[in-house]
Image: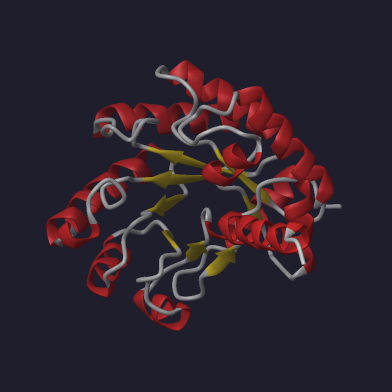
């Protein structure tokens, strides 16, 4: 079984612009094993799915100890694969809180995290300056534990704006953040909500960070995303929603009277 640092390095190498790695997001040890059995190269969680599976709403409402215990079980279930944890906004307003959360994640075996610049309640976003300090805190915590953590810096410009209002100015704003986040120690740029090909192309071409997009019905095809320069495609809450829809329908059929 690879050690944690080796799995972290493997996870970094999976992010190749033009050859996107697919993360079919899991929510617990059982779903992670199923995704691994399908041939996944890495496992990533999605905060919405993990929270829902534990009976909580998204937005850091799932207690951090539960999130950490869950990722620890996932790591044990798929010992040969790198595992990344959606750490949302870092579970706390202070940089010390972010560092603490990251240390716990690494201690549980994670080799990557998502760290978003939006507030947990989606009421706005941290300033660039504040988010830079939070990323630096995450990087320092990882360095202290000698794990080359993949910090997937998420920017919520597109996610917090209606899809029909997305424009070139938002892509430019995302790139401004990408430059600052890269300098602070980010490993990748996650832009959930982006869907127009021209905006994806602009973002991918404008940053040295590998770009991650989230699966949406309006997203270009995987082949087109590769041509646009995407390095990672996440499925977010989709797998959980589909699985629960299947369970509900199967239960309806089983419980239905003849």
Residue 158 x/y as whole percent: 27, 52
Residue 103, compared with residue 42, is above or below; it is above
Q: How is the image coloured?
A: secondary structure
Residue 227 x/y as whole percent: 39, 81
Pick whichever, 150 or 23, lies toward us: 23
Q: Is residue 148 visible?
A: no
Number of marks: 0
- Seen at 36% across and 30% down, the residue is 121
Quadrant including the C terminus: bottom right
Q: In this view, does 27 lie to the left or right of 80?
A: left
Q: In which quarter of the image is residue 170?
A: bottom left
Q: Quadrant of residue 185?
A: top left
Residue 247, compared with residue 88, is above or below; it is below
- Seen at 72% across and 57% down, the residue is 251
Residue 211 x/y as whole percent: 41, 60
Q: Residue furthest right?
A: 1
Pick whichever, 51 or 159, lies toward us: 51
- Seen at 71% across and 45% down, the residue is 5
Q: In this view, does 17 lie to the left or right of 64?
A: left
Residue 104 x/y as whole percent: 65, 26
- Seen at 67% across and 33% down, the residue is 106
Pick whichever, 19 or 32, lies toward us: 32
Q: Quadrant of residue 143?
A: top right
Q: Is residue 202 left or right of residue 36?
A: left
Q: Can residue 61 be seen in this view?
A: yes
Q: In this view, does 47 lie to the left or right of 74?
A: left
């Amino acid at each position: 079984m690879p050690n944690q640092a080796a799995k972290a390095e493997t996870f970094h190498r999976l992010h190749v612009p033009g050859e996107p790695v697919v993360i079919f997001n899991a929510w617990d040890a059982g779903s992670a094993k199923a995704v691994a059995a399908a041939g996944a190269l890495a496992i990533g969680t999605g905060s919405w799915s993990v929270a829902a599976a534990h009976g909580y709403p998204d937005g850091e409402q799932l207690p951090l100890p539960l999130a950490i215990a869950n990722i620890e079980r996932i790591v044990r279930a798929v010992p040969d694969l790198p595992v990344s944890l959606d750490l949302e906004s870092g579970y706390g307003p202070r940089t010390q809180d972010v560092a603490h959360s990251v240390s716990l994640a690494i201690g549980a075996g994670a080799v990557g995290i998502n760290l978003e610049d939006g507030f947990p309640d989606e009421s706005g976003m941290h300033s660039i300056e504040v988010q830079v300090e939070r990323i630096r805190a995450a990087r320092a915590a990882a360095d202290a534990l000698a794990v080359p953590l993949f910090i997937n810096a998420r920017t919520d410009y597109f996610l917090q704006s209606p899809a029909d209002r997305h424009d070139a100015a938002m892509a430019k704003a995302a790139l401004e953040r990408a430059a600052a986040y890269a300098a602070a120690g980010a490993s990748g740029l996650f832009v959930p909500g982006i869907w127009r090909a021209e905006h994806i192309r602009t973002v991918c071409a404008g940053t040295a960070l590998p770009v991650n997009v989230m699966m949406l019905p309006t997203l270009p095809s995987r082949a087109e995303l590769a041509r646009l320069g995407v390095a990672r495609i996440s499925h977010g809450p989709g797998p959980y929603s589909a699985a629960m829809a299947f369970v509900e329908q199967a239960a309806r059929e089983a419980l239905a009277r003849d």
